Image (cartoon, grey):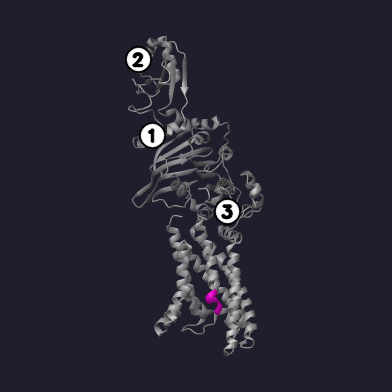
Amino acid sequence: MTAHETTGAAAHGTVVTPGPHTPAPLSGHPFGGAASAEWTKLRSVRFPYICLAAGLIATGVFTFYYGSIARINDHSVQPVGHAAISSTVLVQFAVVVLAMLTVTSEYTTASISSSLLWVPVRHRVQSAKALVTALLSFTAGTVSAATGTAVAWGSFSGHASFDAGETVGQTLAVGVYYALIAVMTVGVSFATRHAAGALTVLLTLLWALPSMLVGPGGPALLAINDWLPHSAGDTFMRGGAGAPYGATTAVFVLLAWVLAAHVTGLLLLRRRDA
Amino acid sequence: MITLRGLSKRYGETVAVKDLTLDVGEGKVTGFLGPNGAGKSTTMRMILGLDHPSRGRALINGRPYAALRHPVREVGALLDAKRCTRRGRPATTCSPRPAATASRRRRRGRGAETVGLAKAARRRAGTYSLGMSQRLGVAGALLGDPAALIFDEPVNGLDPDGVRWMRDLVRAQAAQGRTVFLSSHLMSEMQLTADHLVIIGRGELLADTSMADFLAGSSRATVRVRVPDPQERAVLVRRLAADHSGTAGAAPATVTVDAADRDGIVVTGRTARQIGDLAHQCGVRLHQLSDVHVSLEQAYMDLTAHSVEYATGVRHEAGPAPHGAHHPHRREETR
């Protein structure tokens, strides 16, 4: 700044050439960059591939048994897509683990600092992660549902009905459900920051709580279960069957859960030191 | 330009950073010193928007970090080693950052070369040694070609070659007109690297001064004088004590008999020129008149040892030694 302060630099034998340092202008909205960064991080590590493979295998095994049991017990004819929809009770956890690790692995390695340096706007980081995992989960969901439906068609051997429009709709619905579960998981993971906490919350919400409510049965417990995320998702995927509300309401119930998780995660992410 | 205004951070009862106000200017290397727990990393994390200040502001080019549209292009940061990207291979994931450009591929190849990782670019970053992680972190920081660099302990874990590489790198970056703000514990290294010093202790600013001024103003800035004749020596010592015309204003010179050499005296508070002139006036024959070089380490130790007394006194200029400064290793002291 003042003249004598540059003597230090001069003493080190370097020539100071001050001047404005103007980076070249960039185009595009920062959110695009943030999302592409999340995609790069996701595709360059191993865990997403493991989660996707596990999800696909689990769907295949589940739907095979679902069709076989329907055949062996001589169930009445049902839409073939029900096999894949029923598999979500288990396979959704592949999506949960995938979406969770995109957040918690960064806290484990402290690379969350780097993420927040690259994208300092907190809602942008979270939304980018949510979007990328949601798109991936949607794709994975439709692919695995289609695969599961094909597997189940074989093992049903005549105990299922096939309607092209309905099957496509149910296959896409599984994808949408997984996408929403991914967004919810990202929100919960930002709130808990650690895998153990996130898994506890999501296992309770998506599996333990429904089991505890359905097990003893009774109208009150079952009524509560109807409003939990997986029940709402199941209702949505089956087109409104088996719940006191229709498919549209089911989507809104699910969206309310997703929004609650997302906002909770965002508020905590904003407030906390990284 | 990095601007801190009343920056404070408190964790419950503990005050980590207290009312820091300073500017980190362009075109020079600003060293950030302080003992462990002094608040260096917290300050850097607040500048980078990772930690929220309890009070005050940290601005980069007049804006908070989070308000920068392309932060990676304005500030390159290196936090603790192993804190940067651990996953993936640098060759493919050196740029997990917003704002992809056409020159991205070329630039990250150049980045790997700049930091000497070209050969290891295809390896997984998790397998890197500490030094390699540090280099990878630097590559990440330089990727956006930023105008400001903030490095926290950049030479930690580097071998001598790496330390030298880091020094040359940050000096070159500053010479290009960039703002370079780096923290370190290694005083000898900092003395070679930094132009300007910011020293904090217990979260408070102790000094914000140029390296040259800090060393010159240190209480250890001394002159060694050898006078072979004992009587002439006594005359000179008396004249030095009586003479009040020194640069330090009213502060009297401190004269100490050199422990290692019976002929020698060590003078604090007068320059070699003043002593030489005085000796000439008195007709005192000198065998030696030389500046004793002070190391940053010594000056820093003096400052932090008296950090409480200095907290208000040495804010923006490293003043002369306080009157009562006591140096236990010097045997005799006269005024």
Q: Residue at x 63, y 76 (%)?
A: A147
Mark 2 or mark 3, earlier in chain: 3
Q: Quadrant of the C terminus of chain B?
A: top left
**Magenta span main SS:** helix
Q: What amino acid is found at the position of numbered circle 2 in the picture?
A: Arg
Mark seen at residue B126 = 3
Compared with B94, B198 (above or below) is: above
C-alpha distance separating marks 1 and 2: 30 Å
Residue B150 in view here? yes
Q: Chain of mark 3?
A: B
- Evaluate if marks 3 and 1 touch, with contact meaning CB atoms under 8 Å apart: no
User: Residue B30: image x %, image y %?
Assistant: 49, 38
Q: Chain of mark 1?
A: B
User: Residue A201: image x %, image y %?
Assistant: 45, 69
Where residue A213 sits, quadrant-wise, is bottom left
Write down the region rendered in magenta: A86-90
> In this figure, which residue is indicated by the disc labeled 1?
B314
Q: Are marks 2 and 3 on the same chain?
A: yes
Query: Camera-side residue: B287 or A178?
Result: B287
C-alpha distance separating marks 3 and 1: 44 Å
User: Residue A85: image x %, image y %?
Assistant: 56, 79
Query: Camera-side residue: A249 or A20?
Result: A249
Mark 1, secondary structure of its residue: loop
Compared with B106, A182 (above or below) is: below
The stretch drawn in magenta includes residue A87: yes
Q: Residues within 10 Å of mark 3 (few under 14, many from 20)?
A: few
Residue B107 in view here? no
Query: Camera-side residue: A188 or B142?
Result: A188
Compared with B184, A230 (above or below) is: below
Mark 3, secondary structure of its residue: helix
